[in-house]
């Protein structure tokens, strides 16, 4: 089924709340598409996700690594290193060595490119864009952080573009802020209030930081636009991943709403760890009692009744999701015997994803 | 050992889906029962924590949830306004700056600013003298974002203290950073599940905190399935393989499946206990269809006995 969702797609973005199996689903989609002859790369941008483990690799770097898997196509994997991606980007865009070194050695640059919060989102989009531009893969599968942060990464390029587009950048880069004249009296007032809030040192450092970028800002602006176009492109597919828990389902519905609002291409939902709907015990208790005695039969029956309740709850939750998503396509993957964390487990998921 | 609920700030961290919200709520109840005036805090528009207490509305201001127990959901926009008001000591000037387009675009595009002001609000809630003049709490319990972003959140003040070097931002961010890093004032609890990936991620979180000179105070493992059967009983059930009518066979299969899952859990729990530096507490898997007040009370009681 998922093969039809991904027909003529070159990017698949898996999103959803935490703990619903996004990483394993991303890996299983990538492995399945590779098994069907495609050259696929799967990338994770959550700094804490264990994609490497799921793919049987000891570690993942900022470069794609080939996964040893018996497939007709090729499977590659990487984990985003935001700092490295940032540095590479500067290296690539800098018109000369002086500019490059000025940025790379800038204190603010070093702190921000190392910070986990925020810079991750920019760089994830950057890496996705870069890999897409290089065109070395038939399909890129992106494993994103939990929903609310996933929205941040969709918004990140827009925020950057808005900042560069506005005259805000000039406000900071005008030499010694003398250019404030350009902005009139209001700017002078703003400057003095800002100085009071941040101190003059921080403002001067910021100015130096922005100036060190020189003409590079225009290049970043173009890339941010490129990323926005890429996300909305008809060759991109957003796949929502969820579990049948009611929290996860609320998140999935929320995210679906946001995707449609933003005009982004939604393909379908994958529901993981769905417990089966069990029939009533139907005389099993009495029969078991004869086979194993009353005490053990009662325990077995208690297990059965607990699972039956959970199965009914899962089905009711999924039905609620179906209604809220107006019957969008949905793939259900049953709760498998063991927790999926290796290639073998991924192959078990294949049957349901592609069946 | 001193109780973690005697500190001023407790951060509940961990992988997504491990039950951070439930644990934060149960800890809140436990702290309130000890007579501590408690506020439970959610960040990043989660809107779940208050829902557990039947409060739907998202609000940056505290709502009373129970005796001694309050809750609030931080709105980064409002947190920014409060930060500016405090820094500028003038509502007019704060409004002028916060309302300026240049400032808005800069802070929206700058990574980590939202995290910084969110930590500012969290810090403020844990102070005996509130800078925003709000009511005073004995303890603030925070339902933090999933691991990577949770770490980003707590490291933001340190990052900005270094970026600003000197001046008001550096002073304020430095104060928050110091408070969060001081084990006398701040405790960190990791929520986990007894499964392979969540256990690995918990161990990873502990390592990453250690690399930043911080430590986990406790690990709480959620959703531990009951081990209903004795080994001999499993032997009996397995020996029945394939016998009996369809209904009996379905029940047997389900029971054995549940047993295999419980056994897998106990293996992961063992690994966590062996490899983690922090102590490990457990909470049972709840079969109830929804997490209601009685379940929360029960979890609070169980946590209180273990922490």
Image: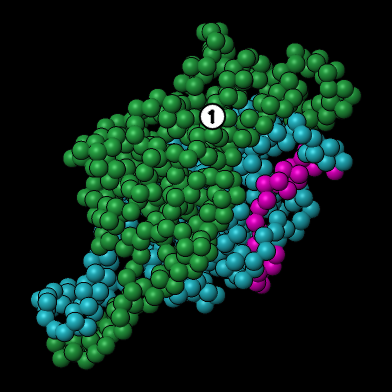
Q: Which residues are magenta?
A: B63-91
At a point 68% along the width and 35% down the height, the residue shown is: B107
Can residue A74 be spotted in the picture? yes
Position above or below: B270 against A182 = below
Q: Position of residue A110 (x, y in %)?
A: 54, 24
Residue placed most toward the observer, B157 or A185: A185
Most distant residue in the right direction: A185
Residue placed most toward the observer, A113 or B169: A113
Q: Position of residue B230 (x, y in %)?
A: 20, 75
Q: Does the segment drawn in magenta span residue B84?
A: yes
Residue placed most toward the observer, A23 or B140: A23
At a point 65% along the width and 20% down the height, the residue shown is: A210
Q: Position of residue B57 (x, y in %)?
A: 67, 64
At a point 27% along the width and 52% down the height, the residue shown is: A350
Position above or below: A47 against A255 = above
Q: Which residue is mark 1?
A: A226
Task: Assess disc 1: are there few (<14), some (14-19) or many (≥20) residues with their C-alpha within 10 Å of its C-alpha.
Answer: some
**Secondary structure beneath disc 1?**
helix
At a point 58% along the width and 36% down the height, the residue shown is: A156
- The tint chain B carries is cyan
- The tint chain A carries is green
Can residue B37 be spotted in the picture? no
């Amino acid at each position: 089924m998922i093969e039809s969702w991904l027909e003529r797609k070159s990017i698949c973005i898996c999103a959803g709340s935490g703990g619903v199996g996004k990483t394993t689903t991303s890996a299983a989609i990538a492995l399945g598409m590779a098994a069907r002859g495609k050259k696929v790369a799967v990338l994770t941008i959550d700094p804490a996700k264990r994609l490497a483990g799921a793919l049987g690799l000891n570690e993942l770097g900022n470069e794609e690594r080939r996964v040893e898997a018996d497939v007709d196509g090729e499977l590659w994997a990487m984990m985003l290193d935001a700092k490295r991606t940032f540095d590479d980007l500067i290296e690539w865009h800098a018109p000369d060595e002086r500019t490059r070194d000025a940025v790379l050695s800038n204190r603010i640059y070093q702190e921000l490119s190392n910070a986990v919060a925020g810079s991750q989102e920019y760089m994830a989009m950057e890496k996705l864009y870069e890999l897409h531009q290089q065109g070395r893969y038939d399909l890129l599968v992106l494993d994103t952080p939990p929903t609310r942060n996933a929205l941040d990464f969709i918004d990140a390029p827009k925020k950057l573009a808005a900042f560069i587009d506005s005259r805000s950048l000039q406000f900071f880069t005008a030499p010694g802020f003398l250019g404030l004249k350009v902005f009139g009296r209001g700017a002078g007032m703003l400057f003095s209030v800002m100085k009071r809030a941040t101190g003059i040192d921080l403002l001067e450092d910021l100015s130096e930081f922005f100036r060190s970028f020189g003409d590079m800002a225009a290049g970043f602006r173009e890339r941010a636009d490129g990323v926005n176009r890429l996300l909305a492109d008809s060759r991109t597919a957003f796949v929502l991943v969820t579990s049948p828990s009611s929290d996860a389902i609320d998140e999935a519905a929320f995210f679906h709403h946001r995707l449609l609002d933003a005009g982004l291409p939604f393909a379908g939902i994958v529901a993981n760890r769905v417990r089966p709907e069990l029939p009533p015990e139907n005389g099993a208790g009495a029969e078991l009692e004869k086979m194993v005695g009353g005490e053990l039969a009662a325990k077995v029956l208690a297990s059965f009744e607990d699972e039956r309740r959970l199965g009914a709850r899962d089905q009711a939750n999924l039905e609620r999701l179906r209604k809220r998503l107006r019957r969008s396509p949905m793939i259900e993957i049953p709760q498998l015997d063991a927790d999926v964390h290796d290639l073998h487990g991924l192959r078990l998921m294949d049957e349901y994803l592609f069946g | 050992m001193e109780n973690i609920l005697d500190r001023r700030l407790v951060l509940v961290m961990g992988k997504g889906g491990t039950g951070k919200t439930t644990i934060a709520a149960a800890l809140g109840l436990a702290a309130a029962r000890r007579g501590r005036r408690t506020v439970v805090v959610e960040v990043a528009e989660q809107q779940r924590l208050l829902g557990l207490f039947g409060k739907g509305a998202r609000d940056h201001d505290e709502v009373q949830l129970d005796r001694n127990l309050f809750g609030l959901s931080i709105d980064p926009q409002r947190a920014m306004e409060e930060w500016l008001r405090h820094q500028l000591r003038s509502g007019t000037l704060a409004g002028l700056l916060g309302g300026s387009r240049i400032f808005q675009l800069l802070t929206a595009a700058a990574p980590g600013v939202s995290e910084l002001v969110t930590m500012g609000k969290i810090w403020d809630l844990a102070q005996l003298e509130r800078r925003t003049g709000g009511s005073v709490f004995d303890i603030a319990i925070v339902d933090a974002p999933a691991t990577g972003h949770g770490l980003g959140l707590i490291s933001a003040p340190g990052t900005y203290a270094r970026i600003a070097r000197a001046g008001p931002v550096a002073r304020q961010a430095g104060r928050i950073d110091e408070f969060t890093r001081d084990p006398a004032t701040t405790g960190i609890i990791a929520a986990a599940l007894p499964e392979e990936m969540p256990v690995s991620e918990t161990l990873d979180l502990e390592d990453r905190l250690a690399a930043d000179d911080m430590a986990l105070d406790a690990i709480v493992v959620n959703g531990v399935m009951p081990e209903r059967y004795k080994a001999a009983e499993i032997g009996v059930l397995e020996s029945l393989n394939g016998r009996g009518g369809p209904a009996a066979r379905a029940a047997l299969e389900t029971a054995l499946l549940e047993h295999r899952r419980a056994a897998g859990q106990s293996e992961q729990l063992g690994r966590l206990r062996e490899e983690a530096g922090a102590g490990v507490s457990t909470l049972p898997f709840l079969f109830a269809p929804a997490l209601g007040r009685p379940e929360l009370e029960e979890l609070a009681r169980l946590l209180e006995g273990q922490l």
